[in-house]
Amino acid sequence: MIQAITNSFRLPDIRNKLIFTGLILIVYQFAAHVPVVGVDRGALDALFQGQSGGLLGVLNLLSGGALQNFSVIANGVYPYITASIILQVLIPVIPRLEALSKEPGGREKIEMYTYYLAIPMAVLQSVSQIQIFNSMGGGQSIIPGFGSDFLLSATVIIQMTAGSMFAIWLGSLITEQGIGNGLSIIIFAGIAARAPQSIATMLGTSTQPLFNLIVFILITVVTIVVVVIIQEGVRRIPVQYGKRVRGRKQYGGASTHIPLKVNPTGMIPLIFAQSIITFPALIVNLFPDGNMKTLINDTFGSQQGFVYWSTYFALVVGFTFIYSDIMVGNQNLAENLQRNGGFIPGIRPGRKTQEYILKVTRRVTLVGALFLGIIAIVPGVVEFIYRLLFPNEVIAGSANNPALVLTGSALIIVVGVVVDTLRQLEAQLVMRNYDRFIR
C-alpha cells in the first residue's frame, strides 16, 4: 500500500490529481468554519456539551465539525445522498423512471434529477436541523428569531442550501479531476479531521483516561479488521454463457460469476435507523407533559437503556434487508443475463433466476445485517460494561464513551474510502506500466 502511494507521486498526472484532491479538501475544511448568520454560540456550545456523545456527536463527526460550528455546510453532502436514495427507491416503483434508467444516457439524466432533488432536500434538512437543535436545547433557540423573522429565516435557509450545493460541487470536482469518489472522500476527510479533537475530549473529560484510550484502540482495531472482512466478503453465483456460432467463428461459452457482497448497503442502514429512532423523542415534545412523555424522553431522548439499543438493532437489521432488496431489484441481474445469453446452471432464465438471486442475496445479507446491527449497539455494550466496572463514570450519551469517538458508521466509511481509493491508485499505476511496483 505504502509503495503504491509512493510510486503515485512519481507520475506527474497522478501527482497532480492527488494535490488537487488535497486542495479541495482544504477548501472544504475552511468552509466548515464559516458560521451561518445569527447563530447564538452560547446556546450552541451548551447544547453540544449536553449532547456530545449522542446523535449530535455522531452527525458532527460525519460533518467534520461543521455541525458544531453550525457552518454554512453543516448539512454536508447528505442532501445529495438522500436524493440519490429516494430516486433509487422510486426507479422500480415509477415505470417512466425505470424505462429511463435502461435507455442510452438515462443514467446521466437520473444523475441530473438527483442534483435537482438535492436542492429541496437541502432546504428541508436545514429547517429540520434547526428545529431539532431547538427541541434538544430545551426551548433555547440556536438562531434567535428563526421562524418569526422572515428575512433572517430566508437568509439562513439560502446560506445552508448554497453551502450544501457547494460541498456537493466540491465532491464532483474531486470525482472528475482528482482521485476517488469525491463525495465519499469529503465525508472521509471530515471524519479524519474531527477524530483527533474527539479523542482529546474523551481523554480530557474522563476519570479513566488510560483505560478509555486502551478500550478505544481495541474497539477501533477489532472493528476495522471485521469491517474489512465483511466489506470484502462476497458470495459468487456461477454464470455460464451459451455458445454462439457466427460464420466460421464461435463466440461465448465462457464461465464467470455474479459477486454478491455480504454488506452491499454500506453504512446507509445505520443512518436510516439513527434518523428514525430519534423521531419519538422529537414528536413527543409537541405534546403536554405527562408520564408517557417522560418515558419516551428517558428511553429515546437520552439514547440509553436496553429498549433503546434493542430497537436500534432491530431497525438497522430491518433497513439492511429492505435496502438490499431494492438494490438487487434495480440491477435487473436476471434480465441482463438473459439478454446476453447467460444463465445460472440448474436455474431457469427469467423470473426463476431473479427469485434465486433474491433468495441467495437475503441469506448473504443476514450476515451483513447482523454485522451492522452489532456495530450499531457497540456503544450500548460499552456503556453496560462501564456501569459494572466504574459506577461513578458518566458515560451514557457522553463524549467519554470510547465507542462514540469513531462510530461504526464512521469506520465503515473510512475503511471503504481507503480501500476504493487505493484500488483506483493501483489501477492508474497499472495503466501506466507501473504494475511491477504493485505486488
Image (cartoon, grey):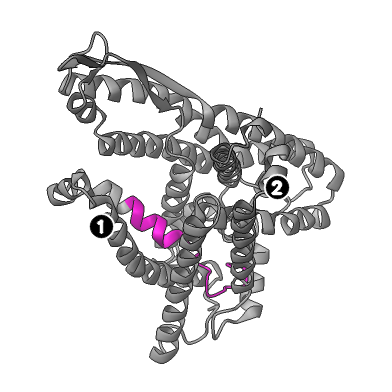
> What's the magenta bit mostly, secondary-structure-wise?
loop
Q: Relative to 337, is 327 above or below?
A: below
Residue lying at the far right in this picture: please name it: 210
Q: Quadrant of residue 352?
A: top left
In the rendering, at what x and y percent does residue 47 appear?
A: 62, 69
Image height of 213 relative to 176, above or below: above
- Magenta includes 409? no
Looking at the picture, how far across and down is residue 258, in whole percent? 36, 23
Secondary structure category for the residue under label 2: loop
Quarter occupied by the N terminus: top right
Q: Which residues are magenta?
A: 66-85
Q: Looking at numbered disc 2 in the image, what kind of residue is underneath it? A: Asn
Which mark is first along the chain, 1 or 2? 1
Q: Quadrant of the C terminus?
A: top right
| Residue receiving disc 1 | 109
Residue at mark 2: 401
Left or right, residue 341 beside residue 310: left
Image mark for residue 26: none
Q: Residues within 10 Å of mark 2 (few under 14, many from 20)?
A: many
Front disc: 2 or 1:
1
Q: Is residue 339 left or right of residue 167?
A: left
- Dots 2 and 1: beta carbons under 8 Å? no
Q: Secondary structure at mark 1?
A: helix
Q: How far across and how far down the image is residue 425, in percent?
A: 59, 43
Q: Is residue 264 left or right of residue 142?
A: left
Give, as a three-letter code, the residue at label 1: Lys
